[in-house]
Amino acid sequence: MSQKEPIWLKILRIALGLLFLFSSISKAVDPVNFGITMNDYFVSFGLPFLKPVALLAGVCAITCEFVLGCMMLFGVKTLLAAWGYLLFMVFFFFLTLWLAVAEYMEIKGIHYFGVVHDCGCFGQVVKMSNMTTFLKNVVIIIPTIIVFAKRKKLKDVRLTELGKWCCILLFIAIAVLFQVHCIRHLPAIDFSDWKKGDNVEKTFIERPAQKESLFIYRNNADQTEVQLTEEELMNQEESFYEQYEYVDRKDKVVAKAKKAEIDGFNMLDEKGADHAYEYINADSKTYLLFLHDLMDTKDEGVKKAIALAASCAEKDIPFVAVTNSEEDEISVFVEEHGIEFPIYRNPIDPAHGPFMVRDAIRSNPGLIVIDKGVVTGKWAWRDMPQKAE
């Protein structure tokens, strides 16, 4: 291998390294989300039975991309890295070509393939259509081929073979441990609409119209009419009723109904009544437990939630839960765990969503504290507080 690396080749090498690092880190901050994307791919290609390994597959893909990026950026076994880049990009070039064509055929009504519409290449940091993703890969594969063709001129770091492999093992360890931390707790960067400081009342809750009753009275002397609110009517003196007689009452809209910016979040009881507005818009603090799927909920997390609910009850703080599971599953779950706090349903289409509960927090169960519509606290079940504050 030549020791002299052309400056233009060095620029390409560094650029490709940084690109892969950005792409991998943008997914690594929320590996659960990429695991969901991987499962969507499995379903799209008729492989739904691979769902149990979707998260593992996502972690492996992110780790591979991160390691290749580090190898290319720092010049560690660049020959191997060049081969890795080429195989990686060729695979995704043809994959995204197919996705772009299939999506176009779906839009035109030619055939429905059920393709994934967001490739997840950059996690939730940058969302791209399949066509945009393919064009992005067209651009990237060109320098990838050039670097591969000139791979023997790439400069390698001055280390022994053992030292180079130790570096690669270090890159793998960093990627895996970081992702494991984000899976066991919460994403390092929260891209959800339920992150701390967000006003979820404005985003998810449909505010009903605010009405005011007006009472119409007619003057007995000159037949003129006045319109009074309930408060104004209560402040009138006795002589008013001697001079005026009641005619009618009408309701005036003082604030129009406000639709939710994002539809789909509700908290239905067994009778179908929605309690989302009641709890999210409450004047006091509310502890809201998210249970994605009751069949997959961690028992240790449920025990922590029950203890915290008891602490909330002592301080008269509302503690409620919301799940995507069906009513019969809720009944079994409540009886099995001896749960005393209410569990509401957020019914969804299991195939198409919207997956409000799952996307709110990457933990099952997970806890979010709402204070007057604003998220003030958020924890994975492992990090839940022991007592209400």
Image (cartoon, rainbow, N blue to C red):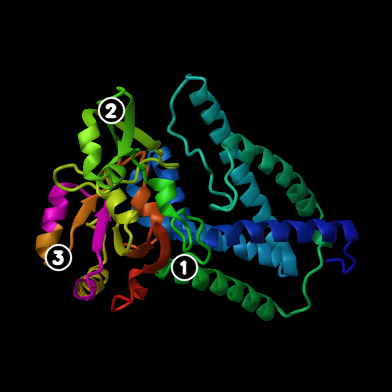
Q: Amino acid at mark 3?
A: Ile
Q: Residues within 10 Å of mark 1 (few under 14, many from 20)?
A: some
Which residue occupies the foreground of this view, 211 or 354?
A: 211
What is the three-letter code of the residue carrying label 2?
Asn
Q: Is residue 144 magenta?
A: no
Q: Locate residue 113, reporting x and y percent.
A: 44, 30
Q: CA distance from mark 1 to mark 3?
A: 28 Å
**Magenta span covers which residues?**
311-332
When asked about the image quadrant of residue 282, the answer is: bottom left
Which percent across, then down, holds residue 366? 34, 64
Residue at image position (71%, 46%) is 140
N-terminal of the pair, mark 1 or mark 3, is: 1
Question: Mark 3 falls on what kind of element?
Answer: loop
Residue in view at x 26 percent, y 53 percent: 323
Give the residue furthest to the front: 221
Mark 2: which secondary structure?
strand
Residue at mark 2: 219
Q: Is residue 47 left or right of residue 182?
A: left
**Residue 121: x percent and y percent?**
57, 49
* Badge nearest the viewer, 1 or 2: 2
Which label belongs to residue 55? none
Numbered circle sitting on residue 182: 1
- Camera-nearest residue between 215 and 12: 215
Contact, mark 1 vs mark 3 (Cβ under 8 Å): no
Q: CA distance from mark 2 to mark 3?
A: 61 Å
Question: Which quarter of the rendered picture does the C terminus lie within?
Answer: bottom left
| Residue at the disc numbered 3 | 339
Callouts 2 and 3 close, C-beta under 8 Å = no
Name the residue type under label 1: Cys
Instruction: Work out which quarter of the rendered image holds the N terminus and state it.
Output: bottom right
Q: In terms of secondary structure, where does tag 1 sit? A: helix
Q: Nearer the viewer, mark 1 or mark 3?
A: 3
